[in-house]
Amino acid sequence: MKQSRKAKILLACFMITSLMLNTGCGRQVAEISNKHYVALITKSTDSAFWKSVYAGANAAGTEYNLNITCNGPSAEEDYTTQNMMIKNAVANGAEALVFSAVDYEANAEAINEAANQGVKIISIDSDVNSDKVSAHISTNNYQAGKMAGKAVIESGEKVLNIGIVNYAVNAENGQQREQGFRDRVKNDKRTTIISTINVPSTTEDAKAATMEMLKLHPEINVIATFNEWTSLGVGWAVKNMNLADKTMVVAFDSNVISVGMLETGEVDALVVQNPYAMGYLGVEAAYKIINGQEIENTDIDTETTLITRENMFDQDCQRILFAFD
């Protein structure tokens, strides 16, 4: 990403969060007008991560004078509803889809059908198995997983008995993060991966499954987990079992609760992505493609930062953790 683009995004990040309410990111159909219509369809709608994506998308929609709609299923495993939303967006005249796939394979047919009707496809966050995607904008998930693994390796513990709590097995980004993590820790003689579980992407499911895992494997002293909801679930499990002093947790994403857990010890490190940039750059790419402009980079890696208790109060980290406060 060029520096000029970074500067533009940094400036946009300090816009107030009311952008989401005031710049046309409707939940249904775009207003009839002369503006180009771009549909943003995400894996869900109510997490801090996706709200940040929407804020970025709205900022770009305002800058480029677009009609934007934002939709997503209530559960991050619901690819069927996502596919219906794709079809509805096409029927309502969307010229481009900015899309994060629940399921790498199961969303592919609906995306291909949309593209065959002339709709431009930009994937963000989680990719889809389609050669119709014009640009992909996301965290480098494999490298982000390696970043989490590096935090574990550098912890100084003499024995690292690891439990992995991941979300949907068909979500491409989660699997890449896990693979990066595994590849980073596998050659360290201190490490043993004791248990790996995949859970529905909800706090309660992750909490219950983590507690069960820790009961079955009390030797686990490290947990790695890979999205906002599983991070919260793991944190609550560690808190409820009074294991904060005995268990290192390396998690993903941030919201007010997980940042609080970082401060109080239930979480030891957060790999924090840049969802605002995903939304902004996704809509910006859609605008350029609709208008026949060339995209210099069709595979954009948005920045990722490892935040720990040691650096969480640094000014730069505070900006990342609380971009909209």
Image: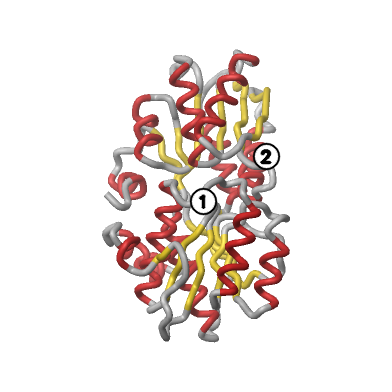
**Vertical arrangement, residue 258 with respect to residue 125, above or below:** above
**Which dot, 1 or 2, sits closer to the camera?**
1
Query: In the figure, residue 298 lies in which quadrant?
Result: bottom right
Q: Which mark is residue 44?
A: 1
The mark nearer the N terminus, 1 or 2, is 1
Please state which amino acid type lies under the numbered disc 1.
Answer: Ser
Residue 138 visible in the picture: no
Q: Position of residue 286 (x, y in %)?
A: 51, 74
Q: Which residue is mark 2?
A: 183
Residue at point 56%, 20% (across, down): 211
**Vertical arrangement, residue 275 with respect to residue 226, above or below:** below
Residue at point 58%, 68% (across, down): 88
Residue at point 40%, 72% (across, down): 61
Q: How is the image coloured?
A: secondary structure
Q: Position of residue 224 (x, y in %)?
A: 56, 32
Please state which amino acid type lies under the numbered disc 2.
Answer: Asp
The residue closer to the viewer here, 162 or 196, is 196
**Vertical arrangement, residue 104 with respect to residue 283, above or below:** above
Left or right, 200 with reference to 109: left
